Amino acid sequence: MKVARRLIRARRGVAALEFALVMPVLLIMLGGVVDFGLVMLARSQLASAVTQGAEYAMATGSSVSPSSIRTMVQSASPLAGVTATVTPSSGAACYCVTGTPLALSSHICTSACPDGSSPGVYLTIKAQYTYQPILPFYSALAATTLSEQAQVRLQ
């Protein structure tokens, strides 16, 4: 009887037991916060790379090649495995701006657009990156394929 009473009153191992029960939950929460932060960092770096590609295209003008823009986007990003696409793939082309948000319809550069405005030479730059999460279940909670794009008027 005395042994049972002593065990009931003993509180030495309670903190260690509580720590052992709570610690896995806290580590999973911490891992989720870190994954979320790393995704936001990757998205920011991807947007910066697309912006640098757009600035390069604007500085070069209508003679810019899609392959040089892709190279610029990929080299401007510190992320490994960034894929960049430039539309149209043959280079800059004439478009009329139609609707909001900015929608482009193909047009001939020598004539005016249907609304009377002049056509512009546009490129669309798009980059994608697949984030590899620290915690395997993060990809079930949020999208891990990040995508950014920019439309650039060259003239």
Image (cartoon, grey):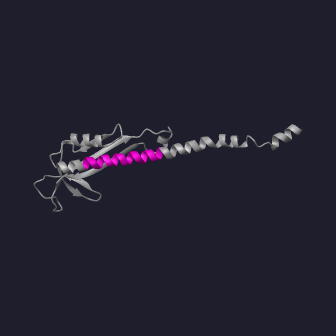
If the image is split into quadrants, where does the C terminus sit?
A: bottom left
Tell me: 131 left or right of 28: left
Image mark count: 0
Quadrant position of residue 147 = top left
Residue extending furthest right?
A: 1
Q: Farthest front residue?
A: 12
Instruction: State the residue in front, 84 or 10.
Output: 10
The quarter of the displayed image where residue 143 is located = top left
Q: Classify 115 as above or below 64.
A: below
Identified at 43% across, 38% down, the residue is 132
Q: Please tell me which residue is depicted at 64% across the width and 43% down the height of the picture.
A: 22
Residue range corresponding to the magenta coloring: 35-54
Residue drawn 33% across and 48% down?
47
Principal secondary structure, stretch drawn in magenta = helix
| Left or right relative to 112: residue 51 | right
Decide whether residue 100 is among the magenta residues: no
- In the image, what residue occupies the spot 41% across and 40% down? 131
Q: Residue furthest bottom?
A: 116
Determine whether 52 is above or below 98 in the image. above
Residue 51: horizontal and vertical position, in percent?
29, 50
User: Looking at the rendering, in which quadrant would you find the N terminus?
Assistant: top right
Relative horizontal placement of residue 135, taking residue 2 as reference (left or right)? left
Q: Where's residue 105, x and y in %?
A: 21, 53
Front one among 11 and 52 = 11
Magenta-span inclusion, residue 53? yes
Percent x, y of residue 133: 46, 39
